[in-house]
């Protein structure tokens, strides 16, 4: 027989199940989203991530919180996200240096990019520069090569990202010189050492270096990518200086743990694409010298595989040994 007690329990259970069902049916997102940046604050990755995170928070109806997790060639941040639940609430900002490069230059890579992550969208392409302090006696790439040949094993560069190391070792190989790579946790630390006179040259993204260039505290010797950048029209590319085929371009993108539902990936991609094309983000990118290039998931995945193959060949030619 149905008693008041059993009826009460039944009503409570039914209510609880209804709540569970309603929660399961709630469209994504229904809680804050964490966006991990595998670099310290102040890097171009960090600046871009924070701008995009703020922009997509409104349309998504949830805060998108940026969390800096630098270290281990980006491996600390990448691993944290790989181990997270594949539900779209934990994302990571991917760069060339934190995705395709680590397996090429490191013996100990904590994650498998193509097995443990699924691409969401690229956010931007970013030009890379080779810079010196503004008062440096080195006025050109030719000056740098001459100085390096005159004083072997003494001139240095900042090794603050994996792609920068590959680019500079390729330069060493092609120029027949031996600039020494000094490792740093992130680009901001390397830039500080360049300004202090403890580094000879430093490769970095235009976005991070822009303020120092404008303040005449640094000078750009060359663009490491394949094209000149509109914000520095007088700075030549390495190809123009005689280094044929020399092209190292940076990009920023968003990755999620493998297994994240496709509708969630599509929603995130849609909002990131709209954000990157918005006037205020376009204005930010213009100040940073970046290009708003938003690739869909499949194209982003293909781009990573293409870069992985390219830089593997570069590393072998330059004689880079895994550490």
Image (cartoon, rainbow, N blue to C red):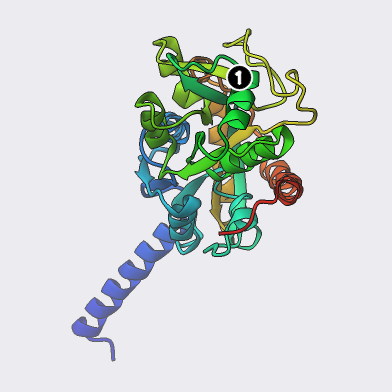
> Relative to the observer, which residue lies in front, 139 or 289?
139
- In the picture as drawn, the residue positioned furthest to the right comes out as 244
Instruction: Name the residue rendered at 49%, 51% in the picture.
Output: 73
* Image height of 248 relative to 88, above or below: above
Q: Position of residue 147 (x, y in %)?
A: 58, 25
* Image height of 214 relative to 184, above or below: above
Viewed as shown, does residue 295 lie left or right of 124? right
- In the picture as drawn, the residue positioned furthest to the front comes out as 150
> Relative to the observer, which residue lies in front, 117 or 180?
180
> Relative to the observer, which residue lies in front, 215 or 81?
215
Q: Quadrant of the N terminus?
A: bottom left
- For the question of whether residue 283 can be seen, the reply is yes
Q: Position of residue 183 (x, y in %)?
A: 45, 45
> Relative to the observer, which residue lies in front, 145 or 128?
145
- For the question of whether residue 96 can be seen, the reply is no
Which residue is denoted by mark 1 in the rendering? 143
* Image height of 13 relative to 259, above or below: below
Q: Position of residue 125 (x, y in %)?
A: 61, 29
Badge 1 crowding class, 10 Å Cα cut-off, few under 14, some 14 to 19, many 20 or more, is few
């Amino acid at each position: 027989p149905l008693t008041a007690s059993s009826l009460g329990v039944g009503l409570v259970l039914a209510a609880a199940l209804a709540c569970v069902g309603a929660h399961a049916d709630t469209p994504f997102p229904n809680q804050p989203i964490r966006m991990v940046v595998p670099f310290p604050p102040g890097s171009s990755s960090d600046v871009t991530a924070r701008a995009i995170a703020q922009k997509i928070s409104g349309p998504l109806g949830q805060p998108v919180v940026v969390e800096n997790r630098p270290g281990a060639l980006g491996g600390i941040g990448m691993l944290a996200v790989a181990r997270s639940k594949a539900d779209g609430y934990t994302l990571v900002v991917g760069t060339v240096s934190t995705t395709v490069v680590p397996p090429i230059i490191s013996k100990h890579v904590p994650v498998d990019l193509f097995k443990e992550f699924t691409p969401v969208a690229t956010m931007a392409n970013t030009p890379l520069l080779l810079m010196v302090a503004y008062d440096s006696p080195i006025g050109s790439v030719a000056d740098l090569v001459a100085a390096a040949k005159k004083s072997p094993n003494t001139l240095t560069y900042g090794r603050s990202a994996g792609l920068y190391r590959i680019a500079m070792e390729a330069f060493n190989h092609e120029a027949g010189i031996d600039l020494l790579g000094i490792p740093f946790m992130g680009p901001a630390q390397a830039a500080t050492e360049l300004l202090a006179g403890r580094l000879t040259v430093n490769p970095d993204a235009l976005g991070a270096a822009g303020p120092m260039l404008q303040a005449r505290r640094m000078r750009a010797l060359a663009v490491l990518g394949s094209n000149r950048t509109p914000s520095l029209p007088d700075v030549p590319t390495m190809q123009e200086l005689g280094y044929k085929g020399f092209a190292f371009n940076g990009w920023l993108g968003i990755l999620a743990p493998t297994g994240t539902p496709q509708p969630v990936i599509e929603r995130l991609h849609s909002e990131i694409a709209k954000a990157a094309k918005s006037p205020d983000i376009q204005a930010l990118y213009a100040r940073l010298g970046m290009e708003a290039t938003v690739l869909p998931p499949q194209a982003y995945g293909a781009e990573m595989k293409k870069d992985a193959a390219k830089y593997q060949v570069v590393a072998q030619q330059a004689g880079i040994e895994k550490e």
